[in-house]
Structure formats: structure tokens, C-alpha cells
Image: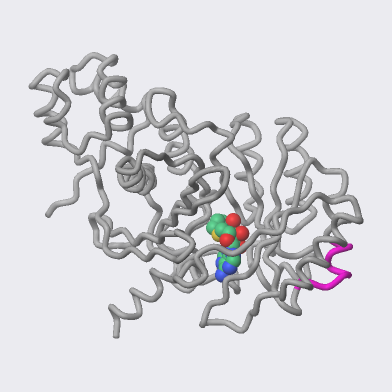
Amino acid sequence: MKAMQSIYDFTLTQLEEMLGELGQKPYRAKQIYAWLYRKRAESFEEMTDLPAGLITQLSERYVIMPVTLVDKQVARDGTAKYLFEMQDGMTVETVLMHFSFGKSVCVSSQVGCNMGCTFCASGLLKKQRDLTAGEMTAQIMYIQKELDAEGSRVDNIVIMGTGEPFDNYDNVLDFCRTVNSDHGLAIGARHITISTCGIVPKINAFAKERFQYNLAISLHAPNDELRRKLMPVDRAYPLDQLMQALREYSTDNHRRITFEYILLKGVNDSDHDAVELADLIRGMNAYVNLIPYNEVDENEYRTTDDRTALHFYDVLMKHGVKATLRTKHGEDIDAACGQLRARHERAGKA
Ligand code: SAH
């Protein structure tokens, strides 16, 4: 099958322009949006209030759903991991998590990743390509259609799957615009979180746009010496530059920042690390999300035990830093970023 562009690629504004080029009225864009995102249409033929000529034009040029499901694992706690295949045969992972505050979907933004974080399974496969906005939207729509059957909805989106969202900035923000649009799924901007390893120029660009999406930063170390060992991006954008950009973002946008900090046994989980971390972010409108490490076979890093994790949390609190200690999800499946896909790739090559 020849790959056809997905209609999910278009933000509402882009759809209006595209319709203009087809000689159609721009107001049709909102109708199409309602069909796609409210009525969850699976074919253009269903869009019965569009002129027949427009339905033909759309069907000849676009598909709706650009992904198919190739694997799904469901953990005992209900966490579900999906492996999707795109039209070029490449695969991406998406995770659905059930929290007390609602259902969250963790979306991938690239096939593979070039950031090279030493603890992460995603980076085992170098970036093959960026995902289009529509391929990210499709991850949400596929799961939303499943949830429709039980009368529930995707409440939150975190762009924390495989890939570095700020290395695919334009597509990621188009995706955010689409799922955020009042004419579509209308997922509130404050229910959408973009997580970056710290690409400073893109943080600056994001800050200038005054977006209301949440920003999360993968920090994982309180000083450059350690951070460099874990995250090569620190060499390009050391902590003083990163923190300066974040202070400006936070002040200009009046937004709270989330710092993600994976606890790695004997690596970044000492009292000294906690105090240094507190010193680094004290005074900022921020909090630290302490994340238990999902162990992967390919490296030596181990999870910090619960007692040490709680102690680390206490030290942060005592030093005036707000923190949360996250519990694990999907432990009995390949829930760590990139694990499911990496396993499939290996199986495919074997
Ligand atoms: N590139 C982006 C988003 C993808 S990673 C970023 O760096 O933020 C999403 C989060 O999962 C990051 O905080 C990342 O460091 C973390 N992560 C990666 N591998 C992990 C693992 N095995 N266990 C727990 N968290 C992991």
C-alpha cells in the first residue's frame, strides 16, 4: 500500500488552508474536526453533511488512521502498553495509565531517540525519524476509541514516550494544538505535559509562545559532572544555562515547572545529592517528581530501594523543596520507555 498522509496531521488552521486549496469553504474544517474528534469517524464516507465532491477529494488524498496495532500488553494494575505500526512499517509505543485523577496516555514523539541517556531503553535504537503530528494524534485517537466502549476518556496526555519532543518541536506543538482544540477532543492545555531532557534554545522558544501546556524537565542529577554521565545533552546545555532558561520561562509564564528525577541506586540517591538538588532549585516555582527506575536488561542501573527513596524525599522537603514520590506502574510488562519496541526489534532481527 502506498503511504497516504493522515488527515490527523492538520491543525484546524492548517485544515482551513488545505480546504481553501481544494476550492472548498474554510468552515468545512470545523465540521470535519467534529467528525474526526467528536464522532470519531473512521472513514470520510461517514461525514454525511459534507458535499459528496469533498468526500471524494478527501478520500483520494488522505487516510484517517495512519497506525495499526501490532501488540498490546496489559499489566495487573491495568496499565496498557500499545505497539503501533505506521504506514512505513516503523513502530512506536504508547502507554495508557489509570490514575485516581483520570486516564493518562504517554505518547511517543520519535521513532528511536538520539539523546543517548545512558539509563534509557529508548536510546538503544537511534532516531529513525520524527513522528508527524498525525501519528501522535493517532496514538490518542486509537486509545480514545477503545475507551469509548467503556464510556471513559483520555484525561491527560504526557509526551514522555520514546523520543525527545523538543527535537521534533513543530510537529509536537501541532499535535498539542489538535488535541487541545475546542472543536476536537478539547483536552485542556494544563492536562498536556511536554517532557524534555533540556534543549535550551527550544525551551526559550516555548517560553516566548506563552503556551499553557505543562513543562517537565528530566533532570536526574544535581550537578554537571554526574548529569553528563547520565545525559549527554548536558554537554551541549549545562545546568547553568538550563536553569537560567527555566527561571525565565517560569517568571514570564507564571507556570510551575516539574523536575523529573529518576532514583538510581548508588548513583544519584545520596543525602548529598538531595541537598545539592534542593540548592539547585530552591526559590523556583517548581517541584520534583521522584520516579522509581524501571530496570532494563541492557544496563547496570538499579532501582533505589523504598526506604532510601523516602529518605531522599524527606531531605528535599526539609530543605524547602516540594516533591512527590511516584509509585510504579505496569511493573509486570515492558513498561520502561522503549522496552516493548526494543524487544520486538530484537525478535525481528533474530
Ligand atoms: N526525551 C524526553 C521525554 C521522553 S523520556 C525527556 O527526556 O524528558 C520520559 C521520562 O522517562 C524521562 O524523564 C526519562 O528520563 C524517563 N525514563 C527513561 N527511561 C526510564 C526508565 N527505565 N525508568 C524510569 N524512567 C525512565
User: Looking at the image, is 68 positioned above or below residue 211?
Assistant: below
Query: Which residue is rendered at x = 89% and y = 50% of the image?
Result: 320
Q: Is residue 274 left or right of residue 288?
A: right
- Judged from this view, the residue extending furthest toward the right is 319
Query: Which residue is rendered at x = 64% and y = 32% of the image?
Result: 208
Q: Where's residue 48, x and y in %?
A: 14, 22
Query: Which residue is rendered at x = 26% and y = 25% of the image?
Result: 32
User: Looking at the image, is 253 positioned above or below residue 263?
Assistant: above
Query: Which region shows up in magenta?
Result: 268-276
Q: Where's residue 230, x and y in %?
A: 67, 71
Figure quadrant of the C terminus:
bottom left
Q: Is residue 118 left or right of residue 325?
A: left
Figure quadrant of the N terminus:
bottom left
User: Looking at the image, is 139 positioned above or below residue 325?
Assistant: above
Q: Where's residue 268, x and y in %?
A: 76, 71
Q: Main secondary structure of the magenta part?
A: helix
